[in-house]
Amino acid sequence: MSKFLKFTAISLCLCSPAFADGFGLGRPALPDEIAAWDIDVRPDGQGLPEGRGDVWTGEEVFAEKCAICHGDFGEAVGRWPVLAGGQDTLTDERPVKTIGSYWPYLSTVYDYVNRAMPFGDARSLEADEVYAITAYLLFVNDVVEDEDFELSHENFLDVALPNAANFFMDDRETTEYAAFRGDVCMENCKDTVEITKRAAVLDVTPEETKARQLREAVAAVKNTAPKADAEVVAAAEVAAEPVAKTADPEMIAAGEKVFSRQCKSCHQVGAGAKNRSGPILTSVVGRAAGEVEKFRYSKPLVAAAEGGLVWTEGELVLFLSNPKKYLKGTRMSFRGLKDEADARAVIAYLRSVAEE
């Protein structure tokens, strides 16, 4: 007999007197024990504890306990989830699902932060801290615009997330289930079979030319030694090679794609643009630093602006390549665009928006 079977037999013998009433293990949970774990918060506000917290306090707590994973402004670090931005991306091939773009209920934000965060130290936040963090997340997602906004158990239900109306009850039982009931045909189901679409036409399977180009690009990267950090961007070369004022449409389109993927969660451009966790970037090319109204810049950026910093094309390429190296102490935690071509394309796009 195996050790496992012996252990099982012994366990059954020891527990058998209690089998009439169950397995004989444990005891019913006490009311106080149940209450300690009954912490869920529901969309109708049930379960909300008393408390309050404002955006500024939330920013401080977030910076101390959350930014290491989620970035200073919720833009994410490494593979940790992005928490801000993503508006108007739900129809994209790779939507950015955040509190401001996707989540339906504010109660889910509070409940998740309260229940599971910070990572590795869950349940360590006081109710006021959770309210403050939630208020800060609302602010960086442009759900609330007042930087002095205070969230509490009293006004919690007054806040509606932008995507709430797009959620609905699962109705497949009545709309689809009937179509899949009944006998299933397994052979000779149709007289003729006609192929109407191909994967290549749907752009699911890359064409051979694209596949070959991709393989060549990967091989080129593997055969190229990594550049030293000091060689990523040479200031002299950048200053000598400004972005053309009349960039070609392909370059502008490429810059718009990079901007949407890397910058849009924090910055807006064009008509109706508003400050988010980062300032408006409309007409930024050639503009003096720190001039966007009603945006609270970091102290290093203010000092650089007072020193006469102007966002020339060359300075922007340097900054976009490595913000923290360019401006020590900046609140912008974005790691940078490692490909100089991407930086130049973004600048071309920003210039095109400014000229509209």
Image: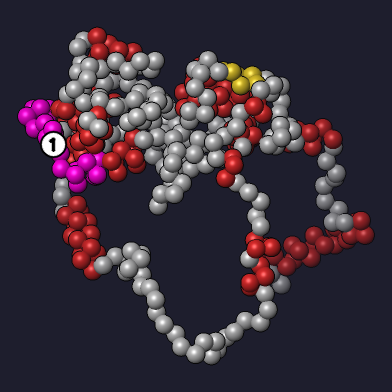
Could you tell me which residue is drawn at 69 percent across and 63 percent down?
174
Q: Is residue 20 left or right of residue 140?
A: right
Query: Considering only vertical position in the picture, is 182 above or below 141?
Result: below
Could you tell me which residue is drawn at 67 percent across and 70 percent down?
178
On-image quarter of the C terminus: top left
- Quadrant in the picture for residue 42: top right
- Viewer-side residue, 256 vs 27: 256
Do we see residue 170 in this rendering?
yes
Give the number of callouts: 1
Residue behind mark 1: 246
**240 falls in the magenta region:** yes
Percent position of residue 143, x then y:
52, 29
Helix, strand, or loop for circle 1? loop
Percent position of residue 116, x then y:
60, 36
Q: Magenta span covers which residues? A: 235-255
Percent position of residue 34, x then y:
79, 37
Could you tell me which residue is drawn at 68 percent across and 23 percent down?
153
Question: How has the structure been colored for display?
Answer: secondary structure
Name the kind of residue labelled 1 in the image: Thr
- Viewer-side residue, 278 vs 167: 167
- Viewer-side residue, 179 vs 266: 179
**197 falls in the magenta region:** no
Task: Kindly report the secondary structure that dominates the magenta region of the rendered protein.
Answer: helix
Could you tell me which residue is drawn at 29 percent across and 27 percent down?
282
- Viewer-side residue, 170 vs 132: 170
- Quadrant in the picture for residue 346: top left
Percent position of residue 276, x then y:
41, 26
On-image quarter of the N terminus: bottom right
